[in-house]
Image (tube, grey):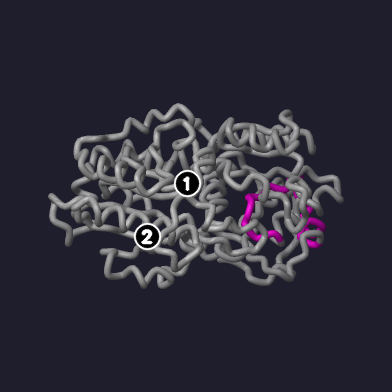
Amino acid sequence: MSNSIPSLHPRTEGLDLLLFVEDPSAVNYAALLLPEFERRNWNVLLCAANIAAGLLRVRGIDFLQTDAATSARALIERNRPKCVLTGTAENPDTLGLQLIAAAREQGIASIAFVDARMNSEYRFRGRSADPLAHAPDWLLLPDDWTLKAFASLGFARERMAVCGHPQHDLVRELAQQWSRIGTPAFRRRIFPEVPPERRIVVFVSEGSLRYDIQPKASAADFGLKGRGRDNGRTKIALEEVLDAMAGTGEKPYFVFRAHPTENPGDYAEYGSEIDRISSDGSALELIYASDLVIGMTSTLLLEALLLGKPCLAVLPDASERAWLPGTESGLVPYATSREQLRLALARSLQDHSRLSTAIGVPEVIVGAAQRGADFIAARLQQSA
């Protein structure tokens, strides 16, 4: 059971790790690290704020809830952890950055885990102009691309470790398990109303910015413009996909999967063009039951690839292909103009036999939880 009053939380003796999460991606990462920590008999205090708190409750994971009034310094002084471990968050005022600073003041090692390369210059910026203003002592990273991104910002390479992402390991395992059940069984359960011959397309939202810290790209600079009524990236991409699909002559069953940070009702205006707006239940099961997954820069695209699903990325700017391993490596085709999107979508919808070999994606590292825990164990040993 979570405790919503941090000041009443008792002092924890012999605490190995103080772990903090705030955003959905950090929850996915941390939740899969916890069993490895338990296996090693580590004493861990998990703290969570905002959206992460609700997601942890759904998973039945015990945690200490924090809020804007929680003092990072008091939290560390009360619990005296050997190490602070934190995810990253969109929120420039996140307690995670404050915990890193408070740990440094008290001579405690700090580690942050990063889920993906995108927005590397904003993860430790806070309200400053320095992308490493609030950087931790050490970084756990999913791949070499992300390491190079932080190295280019000035973070020391010897203080970074490429460990993979525990979620990718989970998706690989699920792909193997579900392949024995088969897509038709998932499809009948999740989409009982859809005839077997009708294709199912899932558009996964990347979410919208909740904090005004990143410069807003002008829609005039995008290769894709949408219908001209909205400047939001996701709506522009969605409108382009819906219009391109209407031009193919195909009428697949179209699903919009909202990001955990979004209100699905914000997309009600497209109700006449979308067969289902999805926000509950497993996104991975939804994807596995589909025939084609379309997105922008959401990590769900990589996870869809790992599930063996054909994918298509719709990017307002071609430079964004470097944000995800799938588009960077060419495993996921992408479109940055209406003509490219029309051709790619028609090709994807017509090729009923195409299956990805993504279970063997070379860019995805196996054994992330153990690798990450090994790295943390070395830091704990140094602290001791």
Q: Is residue 140 above or below residue 98?
A: above
Residue in the picture at 33% in, 65% down: 277
Tag 1's secondary structure? loop
- How packed mark 2 is, by other alpha carbons closer than 10 Å (few <14, some 14-19, many 20 or more), is some
Q: Whole-percent x and y of residue 77?
A: 82, 57
Tell me the residue at 28%/65% (across/down): 273
Q: Amino acid at mark 2?
A: Glu
User: Magenta residues, as a range?
Assistant: 74-92
Is residue 352 something one can see in this rendering?
yes
Residue 239, which numbered label? 2
**Residue 6 at x, y percent in the picture:** 70, 68
**For this rendering, which residue is in front, 13 or 17?**
17
Q: Which is nearer the eye, 79 or 255? A: 255
**In this picture, is 324 found above or below 55?**
above
Q: Dot 1: within a 10 Å radius of its alpha carbon, few (fewer than 14), some, or many (20 or more) residues? A: many
Q: Say whether residue 185 is left or right of residue 44.
A: left
Image coordinates for residue 207, horizontal then vertical, percent: 49, 59
Mark identifier at residue 299: 1
Q: Quadrant of the N terminus?
A: bottom right
Magenta-drawn stretch contains 86: yes
| Tag of residue 376 | none
Left/right of residue 257 with respect to residue 321 in the rendered view:
left
**Rendering coords of residue 99 (x, y %):** 75, 54
